Amino acid sequence: MKTKIFLVGSLLTAGIALTSCSDDFLDQKNTTSPNQETFFDSDEAIDKAMYPLYNYVWQSFNDKAYYGMGDGRANNLTAQYSDYIYPYTNFNETSLSPGLSDAWGSLYSVVAQSNNTINNILTYSTSAVSEEAKTRGVAEARFMRGVAYWYIASLWGNAIIYTRTSDLVNNYVVPANPRADVMEFAIRDLEYAAAYLPATSPESGRINKYSAYGMLSRVYLSMAGLTTEGQYDGNNVATDFNRGTRNTYYLELARKAAMKVINESDFKLMTNYGDLFKIENNNCQEDMFQLQWNQGSTDAIGWGCNQTITAYFGWSTMVTDGTNWGGATYASYDLFTEYENNDLRKHESVAWYGEYYPDMYTKGGGYTYGVTENAGSQGANIKKYVVGTHDDNGVSYKQSSGINTHMLRLAEVYLNLAEAILGNNASTTDATALYYFNEVRKRAGLNAKTSLTYEDLRHERRMELAFEGQYWYDLVRRAYYKQQEVVNYVNNQNRNASYYDSSTHEYKLSEDYVAPGKGVATATEKNLLLPFSDTDQNRNPYLKSDANGNIQTVPYEFGEREVSEESLFN
């Protein structure tokens, strides 16, 4: 375990002042004593302990792994000169690849800080702290830990589960736990959060119980592919990854979780898709979980609570303050051409020749891609998370744009519901599935479907959530039960393709392109999981694989279930 993942633990008890990135969330100063033994002396102190869980601990993940793994590996974006993306796009990553150890460490930062928060609340809360506040605080931290473990299980499979960070400080050489156990651990954390978080968020930007139900609708779909039938008991792990069917028990739980959100929560779709990606709409009615980034220059707010994605996607100083590394980061050819005609989401997600953006370069009357300045030479640039400069919005600074990161939106829950109802069928005409699926399409300006297939769902999820770090996990989830199909799919993508003709301003595949793309290896089932980094293997030899590519694992010892299915869904 890397030592650096524990550094953020000090944030919990530090006397930090956080500047707001919404009207009220984080807009407080912590005046409590910076001693963990005396910090938890009020319900307000419990709330303050939550704040780093929404930004600092996720910063490294957000900086690169969020889109590099979620979109780059899935071929939603092409970045042939960015070494934190192209090894994963090209399927030739090794244990020495840049960014690998950082991705692992960034997610364990979330785990470590969540553990610290939970244990400190339980250990050091004084009698002045209400039981309600303690339970809510533990539930909020367990939500974060559960989400982190879902990512870890999805990317690496086997992983180390632990609940006390201090236990690993002096003994981090421990065997990993099997993937299904890691997913089960994530589920139990999220179920606890669903049971004990309040129905209404205590502050703008903080999660509530329906955020947990929404996340469960995603994670249950993953568990449906990893198990055969019934509730997970350690003995029903799926071993045939081409069996073609999923565990109907978890498909039904995914359906129930999504319906809880739909029937009981106050979340609603935004009317206009593009409004989701405006700074003024941080924490909007559709967002169920966002990473909360402070607004201001890094000189003023420091490093760690600033939004950096914009700097990696922005292609010029006309659209991004100061630093912009996105000039050679493009939407992939496959994604660009998969958009249906008249799909309103394309304009908001991808910038291509002739597209006009009135809220960027406002002092010049707006920004027309390819006209205001030259278009990208290889393809269409990424528009999502590119929000203009400080002159345009009064908020953004160099490497600190101020827009929050989307982690879970209601639109995804609608699509999760449709997938759960489709289940193991080739198609469905179920009225509920169609209604919520078509609500997503209707907003995009597209015609309604009269029946649904997996291909419809795959396409819709890709278009709706492009550059929101989800598509690779969609493919991984499919590979739990249709592995060869997914391997064939990624091997038939056009990766690293150039597709812009500057003489005609047409977007078409370059004549000299040869599939599968320059530097791209043929993917196998092994590429569905990432290797452990060389750094982490050296720190913990249990992470080193044998001649067959397997590592030693030990079952995690679960206690009794804290939350029953009946209590969750009745």
Image: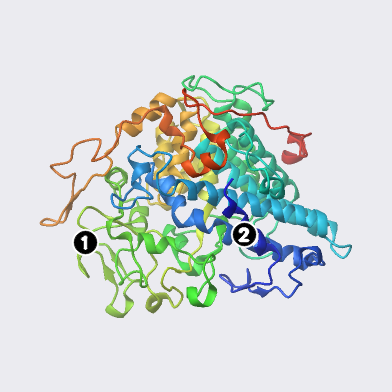
For image coordinates 65% across by 64% down, the residue present is 11
Q: Quadrant of the N terminus?
A: top right
Residue type, numbered disc 1: Ala
Camera-side residue of 327 and 568: 327
Secondary structure type for disc 2: helix
Disc 2 crowd rating (10 Å Cα; few below 14, some 14-19, many 20+) is some
Camera-side residue of 160 and 465: 160
Task: Please determine whether, in this image, residue 399 is positioned above or below residue 184.
Answer: below
Label 2 vs 1, first from the N-terminus:
2
Instruction: Name the mark on residue 270.
Output: none
Residue 75 visible in the picture: no
Q: Identify the residue position indicated by label 1 in the image.
A: 375
Are the two marked residues, 2 and 1, in contact with CB atoms closer than 8 angstroms? no
Q: Quadrant of the C terminus?
A: top right
Disc 1 crowd rating (10 Å Cα; few below 14, some 14-19, many 20+) is many
Q: Is residue 215 left or right of residue 322?
A: right
Farthest left residue in view: 503
Q: Is residue 256 left or right of residue 133?
A: left
Where residue 204 sits, quadrant-wise, is bottom right
Residue type, numbered disc 2: Val
Where residue 168 sits, quadrant-wise, is top right
For image coordinates 52% across by 40% down, the residue present is 538
For image coordinates 46% across by 75% down, the residue present is 395
Task: Tell me how far mark 2 sits from mark 1, CA to CA.
Answer: 41 Å
Q: Identify the residue position indicated by label 2 in the image.
A: 8
Give the x, y percent position of residue 317: 31, 71
Report the label total: 2
Give the x, y percent position of residue 398: 41, 72
Give the x, y percent position of residue 555: 67, 29
